[in-house]
Amino acid sequence: MQIKEISEKLTISPRAIRFYEEKGLLTPAKNQENNYRDFTEKDAWRLQTIIALREVGMSIPDIKAALKQIDEGNHDELQYYLELQRYVMFAQWLELKENIRTTDQMIERLVQNKELSLEQIFTLAEGSKRLRDLRKNWHDKWNFDHQARTHDVHVLRNEQTFNVYQNYEEALEMTLTWVDPIPNEKGLDLGTGTGNLAARFIDKGIQMAGVDQSKEMLKQCKRKHPQMETKLGNFLAIPYLDGQFDFIVTSFAFHHITDAQKMMALDEMRRVLQPRGRICITDLMFENEIHKEQYLGALLKQGKMETYTAIQDKYYANSAQLLAWFTTNGYIVKHQKLHELLYVMYAVPIR
């Protein structure tokens, strides 16, 4: 096929085909007699792939990387690129929803007050920008991809000075017991890691999905629990449409986002939950800011600098702040402390 023929077959302009050639995405052979490009069926399939990936918003460099994985038969890496693209699209979709909400608020105030001051426009726009920045500014400074293969061993041995995983098994079991899932319910484990918490629900016959920002953690999770659905994502952009789950659980993961991001994460959880959806958060927390200051101050006095630094490296929640959010948003909450910092907090909506 020559360029005109393949452009008509795939309904794409010759100019676009040449652009993809220039970018190194497509390398058709040239006829030695007339120097025209000869497109094979394989070229047509490759071009269809490029078109499809462009349709979902993938950049040229990412398409090039994805095509490389296809050429090498590396389906795992190709899946990662596609999942990463899906995560990006969900983040953009959430941003668009927030922009629509902000615009609706401007319209509502204009209708009610017959005017909209610059101060009001700035306040609404600034609020939208703040949420967008919170979502975009998170990054994995702990390199969980690197930790994935040894994560389960690390949890069991717990060789760190600061025992993050003290009462680990007890905490996971209490999470399962409190959520008390019933047949036909579907649950989501956020920050699933290698799937240790989700596995307890699966063993009870409950359908579980897991979300994590680390592709290597998800590989380990899928290896251990092949029947479990996993997706690349994080607390701030959960890659599911609204109202998909009956309950959400998370364990030893909530401390990887800031206090402000935690509030956004709770809104995200509520978005993907059904109207009566429950939330259970299992993690290390402080009772309040005073407790945190006293606890850290005591560590300094005792010269426990390694423990002090380990705690400061994370964003352990203020349990009073979480309880206030749940109460404000119509949940009834029970919580229990398993040791000096480890809590299980279970919230059920009552309105």
Image (cartoon, helix red, strand yellow):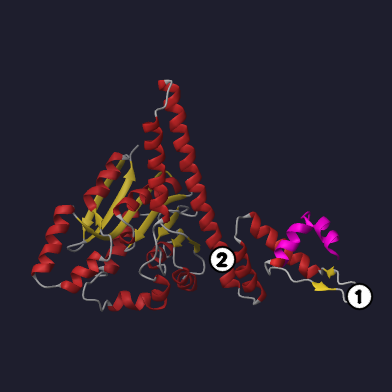
- Say which quadrant the C terminus sits in: top left
Locate residue 139 relative to residue 301 in the image: left or right.
right
The residue wearing badge 2 is 81
Give the spatial CA distance, label 2 vs label 1: 40 Å
What is the crowding at mark 2: few (fewer than 14 residues within 10 Å), some, or many (at least 20)? some
Q: For the stretch drawn in magenta, what is the main secondary structure?
A: helix
Give the percent coordinates (x, y) of residue 176.
34, 59
Residue 98: x and y in percent read 46, 42
Q: Amino acid at mark 1?
A: Glu
- What residue is pinned by disc 1? 33
Hey, which residue is sitting farthest left in the picture?
A: 301
Q: Is residue 26 above or below residue 124?
A: below
Count of residue discs: 2
Q: Is residue 282 visible?
A: yes
| 220 over 282 or under it: above or below | below
Q: Amino acid at mark 2?
A: Tyr
Which residues make up the magenta segment? 1-21
Quarter in which the N terminus is drawn = bottom right
Asked if one can make out residue 270 in the rendered structure from this viewpoint, the answer is no
Picture layout, residue 195 above or below residue 92: below
With 59 as the anchor, is 208 left or right in this view?
Answer: left
